[in-house]
Image: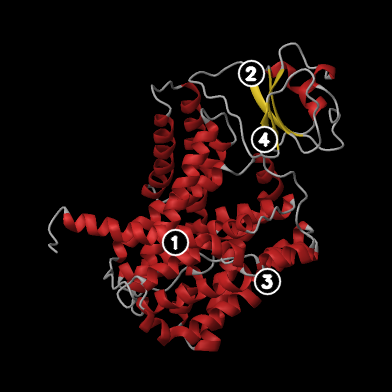
């Protein structure tokens, strides 16, 4: 077959489409085993590569780096949009320590192990430690969601924020060490100053872009609903690009911007959240498939013992030690410390960071890339397959209402004077067992929809609210407090 256009592009789309379809279909089996779905995508990419059954020749690290940067931006943005302010308040301090001091300590201890146990040179050992020092939010919560686990609030908030915040520190360390190795220069005390300045710049610019974006989304009137998604995507890319251009942390800025936007009034919120969730999944699949194509199985065999050894060292010794020391001031229970230590999954981020030294031409960078692959696999499989069992064993699952089978959203081009509030009716609810006619709703309030199991019930005056019902109540802002007094805590909180 000819390789001229449009056939070459069509062939590329067919190959990539088939790989993505296989990855998505087999993700269900991966979830049953507790294995991070992203790891499955990585392995499928490797099987399809030059030395696999697919025979796809791909070694463009620069393209992989650019794709990975875009994917990370979208994944972090999606994570930030879904981070409630209550989680930030509850887990910000321990997560900040884990994401800064914890990342630096992890990098150092892995480097010491790589030097003392496996004989790597100090600079290469430090670079390896920096590359694998951050956990992966996408991997952590993909495992939790696929296992159907709802964690207790403080533990879940700390894990979520740590995973979203620790990438910037690892990126700064990796880039600094890569530059030092490529130039043949020693590290100096300026590294600490640079880390602080980049994090501060990323945080400040993130807050600025976030609040400016929130004001823009509140006041702008676009002619089509789909354009609001275009606007939020533009904010995500600006959030990464602008701080990076002025030597700030783009990754931190993206997460901060998304948290600010997600905790404000978003037009078409439900639709926007679904769009960003879908793009985050697409980014994960594409990123891991491409990274898998870069891996050569024959080269993996050469570094297998080193990768497995360092992976076990990181997951079984370094991570628990670092987490224990970092969380000492915050009075976590030993079960919570153990759990946070164990669920420190690695994912795409270390593999993307491992492309930095390859692009910079650092000696031994290709071997480092394949070592990182093994570390990611080990730190995904060992904790990943045991997450559900460990959660129940330690008693850290939260008893929360099941998600409704349907949701209700009011889509409007204008900021309407009213809210649609979701509630879950449990046995202790004041309205449980009452008919709608007997509930003293304010004059301007009405029950719009009732979801009972897999049925939608049209609420009428004689409709009796039962435990396990999900209801959606419309009310005016001035009546919100009374409605919440009647129905209890909002389901989304």
Q: Secondary structure at mark 1?
A: helix
Find out whether the residues at labels 1 and 2 contact each other: C-beta distance under 8 Å: no
- Residue 420 picture location, percent across and down: 65, 25
Find out whether the residues at labels 2 and 3 contact each other: C-beta distance under 8 Å: no
Residue 357 or residue 141, whichever sits in front: 141
91 lies left or right of 274:
right
Q: Which residue is mark 3?
A: 320
| Badge nearest the viewer, 4 or 2 | 4
| Badge nearest the viewer, 3 or 4 | 4
Q: Secondary structure at mark 4?
A: strand
Check the image and report above or below for 104 versus 247.
below
Find out whether the residues at labels 3 and 4 contact each other: C-beta distance under 8 Å: no
Q: In the rendered image, is residue 135 in sight?
A: no
Tell me the quadrant of the picture where the N terminus can be found. Answer: bottom left
Crowd around label 3: few <14 · some 14–19 · many ≥20 (10 Å)? many
Task: Identify the residue at horizontal 68%, vertical 71% (top origin).
Answer: 320
Q: Which residue is mark 1?
A: 23
Q: Which residue is mark 4?
A: 455
| Badge nearest the viewer, 4 or 1 | 4
| Badge nearest the viewer, 3 or 1 | 1
- Looking at the image, tell me whether mark 4 or mark 1 is earlier in sequence order: 1
Crowd around label 2: few <14 · some 14–19 · many ≥20 (10 Å)? some
| Badge nearest the viewer, 2 or 3 | 2
Q: Which residue is mark 2?
A: 418
């Amino acid at each position: 077959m000819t390789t001229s256009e449009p056939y070459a592009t069509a062939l590329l789309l067919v190959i990539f489409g088939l790989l993505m379809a296989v990855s998505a279909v087999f993700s269900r089996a991966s979830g049953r085993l507790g294995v991070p779905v992203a790891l499955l995508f990585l392995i499928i990419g490797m099987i399809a590569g030059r030395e696999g059954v697919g025979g796809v020749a791909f070694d463009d690290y620069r393209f992989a780096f650019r794709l990975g940067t875009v994917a990370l931006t979208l994944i972090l943005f999606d994570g930030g949009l879904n981070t409630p302010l209550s989680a930030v308040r509850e887990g910000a301090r321990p997560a900040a320590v884990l994401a800064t001091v914890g990342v630096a300590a992890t990098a150092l201890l892995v480097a010491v192990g790589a030097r003392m146990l496996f004989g790597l040179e100090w600079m290469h050992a430090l670079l390896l430690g920096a590359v694998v020092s951050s956990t992966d939010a996408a991997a952590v919560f993909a495992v939790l969601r696929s296992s159907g686990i709802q964690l207790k609030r403080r533990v879940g908030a700390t894990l979520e924020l740590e995973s979203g915040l620790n990438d910037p520190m690892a990126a700064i360390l990796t880039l600094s060490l890569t530059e030092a190795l490529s130039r043949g220069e020693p590290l100096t005390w300026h590294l600490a100053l640079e880390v602080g300045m980049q994090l501060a710049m990323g945080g400040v610019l993130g807050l600025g872009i976030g609040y400016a974006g929130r004001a823009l989304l509140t006041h702008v009137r676009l002619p089509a609903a789909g354009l609001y998604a275009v606007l939020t995507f533009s904010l995500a890319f600006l959030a990464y690009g602008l701080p990076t251009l002025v030597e700030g942390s783009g990754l931190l800025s993206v997460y901060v911007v998304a948290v600010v936007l997600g905790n404000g009034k978003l037009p078409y919120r439900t639709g926007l959240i679904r769009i960003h969730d879908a793009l985050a999944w697409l980014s994960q699949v594409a990123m891991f498939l491409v990274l898998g194509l870069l891996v050569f199985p024959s080269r993996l065999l050469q570094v297998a013992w080193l990768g497995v050894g360092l992976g076990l060292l990181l997951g079984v010794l370094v991570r628990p030690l670092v987490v224990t020391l970092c969380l000492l001031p915050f009075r976590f229970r030993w079960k919570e410390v153990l759990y946070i230590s164990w669920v420190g999954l690695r994912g795409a981020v270390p593999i993307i960071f491992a492309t930095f030294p390859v692009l910079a031409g650092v000696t031994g960078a290709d071997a480092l890339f394949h070592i990182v692959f093994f570390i990611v696999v080990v730190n995904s499989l060992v904790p990943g397959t045991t997450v559900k069992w460990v959660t129940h064993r330690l008693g850290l699952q939260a008893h929360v209402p099941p998600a409704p089978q349907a949701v209700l959203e009011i889509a409007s081009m204008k900021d309407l004077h009213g809210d649609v509030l979701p509630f879950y009716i449990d046995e202790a609810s004041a309205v449980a067992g009452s008919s709608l006619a007997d509930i003293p709703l304010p004059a301007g309030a009405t029950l719009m929809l009732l979801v009972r199991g897999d049925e939608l019930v049209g609420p009428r005056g004689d409709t009796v609210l039962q435990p396990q019902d999900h209801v959606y109540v419309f009310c005016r802002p001035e009546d919100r407090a009374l409605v919440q007094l009647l129905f209890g805590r909002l389901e989304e909180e």
